[in-house]
Amino acid sequence: MQFEALPVHQSKQSSSGIKLVIARGLDSTRVQKSRPRGPTNPPPGAFALAVATATMEESTSTGSGLAARGDLRSALPFLPVVLRGDSLFWPPAAQESLRALALGPDVSRVVSGDVLADALTDLRQALDLPPLSAHAAEGFAIFFNDLLSRVHAQGWFAEVFPSLARLLLRLPALLEDHYAKAADGESGLRILGSQDAGVVLLSQELAAALLACALFCLFPTADRGEASLPRINFDGLFSALTHKPRQSQEQKVRAQSYIIQTLHISKYFCSVPQDDTDYKELLLATFQAPCDVFSSGFIEDEEQEALEVDFANKRLGGGALFRGCVQEEIRFMINPELIVGMLFMASMEDNEAIEIIGAERYGSTFRFVGDYLDTRPFDSLRRRRTRILAIDALARPSLSQYESSGLLREANKAFCGFMDPSKQQFYVKLFQNQDSNNKDNCSSTSSSEYIGVSTGNWGCGAFGGDPEIKSMVQWIAASQALRPFVNYYTFEAASLEKLEEVIQWVLHHGWTVGELWHMLLEYSSQRLRKETHVGFFGWLLPNDSRCCDIL
């Protein structure tokens, strides 16, 4: 990929203590498709543009330029702006409302949460959107009238909202500039539907404007369900404040004061084994991914550069903008720029994963306690060295997680996320069993970056997965993907007390990926036949006579 670096961000501190980051970041000028991606190449997989079929009466040009772009036409039905000729605009009534907000409370008269809700309803109606729901309007009033101190609320009305309105007035120009720089159409903002692999690069300022749209609840939503897109407007987040207990919802809303950075969002899909025999026959020499186990600590505090696993819902973000409060929702609150991906990423299929690079961290925990200084270093493109990987596990699988199809689904999903696109050709040979036991096969495509995997109890907890099985599946997938290391955070789960012992047992015996996979299948088969009721670790380790009989 080739990039054009623009001036980096500038920070402004308001008198209310709310930090606004008005930024210019990075845009892509060229991304190629359908080829393996190394440090300077694109992600794999053919990319198919989802061209929207909605009628756009505002568009009158059929020639070259914006009106002819498939990426823009894909995204336009889900954006609040309109296309006339080869230019983007706010509808006149919406532009006037934004101008009034930009001039501050002396002109807009927005001095309370309920008046703000009325102003946002006026904006929505100017965009031919329905009014805010009664619960959402009540939520705005609760937050700005009751939950915020009077001083902080005044800061929002006098400084924050006018600044955001001015930023929104620039949205059409920011989008035009974005599409001009994404000249080939393959890194521009567009809807990435099922089996559409590609990269979207957003500048910091454009990311900020899109998040401001979400806060103001300005995105059209009528067709999002049909397109398998998650909710994006913040009305659900504010509506949840009307429910009790509401402490977690209050913390979510507070966290959104800290949003703006550069995002590099990629969606991958991959060809994967369709039969469990494929895994049993793999002959990768040894586990190339050392696995370190941590009983305490968190994935987001990872000190090494790694793919930090988001235990995702198949719809990116899950309940982040409503009442959800588990691992994915917490990550979206402390790295709130992740929410931008919810605008255009459709539900993931079983062979898809989403990677987001460069999302800055604005909180140390889910509870909002003020500004947080992200100390992650920058890469050569001035992005934070943060790689967040969204992969969704089977939800509440019960006994089906022990079926070979369930194990294969989870292994494939994890592999799709952990794969290094620069090693795609080696993966092809691996799955075709072409000299797959020779590690030198991947030497010519090895990435120069030492990027491992930081994960934990993916698909467990609320999702109902077996932590012992999921830990082994992830280790298998990371090893097969040739990742240099795995850091596994158990979150003090009692069932994983022997995880490190199991890892050392497997390494000591020099088992291949295929051999460990075979053991998982054998254990799961016995579990389904009710021949064993112990966990996989107890079944495997030598103090269990059944394991000794198998070995």
Image (spheres, rainbow, N blue to C red):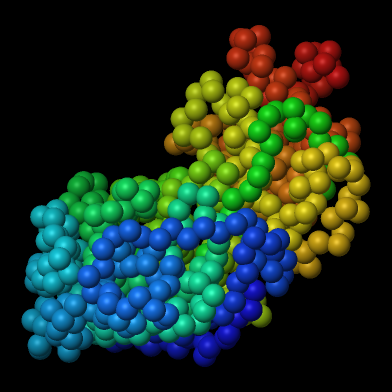
x and y percentages locating residue 280 in the rendered image: 78, 29
Q: Number of callouts in the render?
A: 0
x and y percentages locating residue 523 in the rendered image: 70, 20
Q: Relative to 442, is 216 on the left or the right? A: left
- 104 w.r.t. 330: above or below: below
x and y percentages locating residue 451 in the rendered image: 71, 61
Q: Residue at x 55, y 59 (%)?
A: 47
Q: Relative to 125, is 520 on the left or the right? A: right
Specify the quadrant that holds the C terminus.
top right
- 350 w.r.t. 59: above or below: above
Who is closer to the viewer here, 543 or 110? 110
Q: Residue at x 89, y 36 (%)?
A: 510
Residue 377 visible from this viewpoint: no
Q: Residue at x 10, y 88 (%)?
A: 106
Who is closer to the viewer here, 44 or 135? 44
Q: Relative to 290, is 388 on the left or the right? A: left
- 22 w.r.t. 225: above or below: below
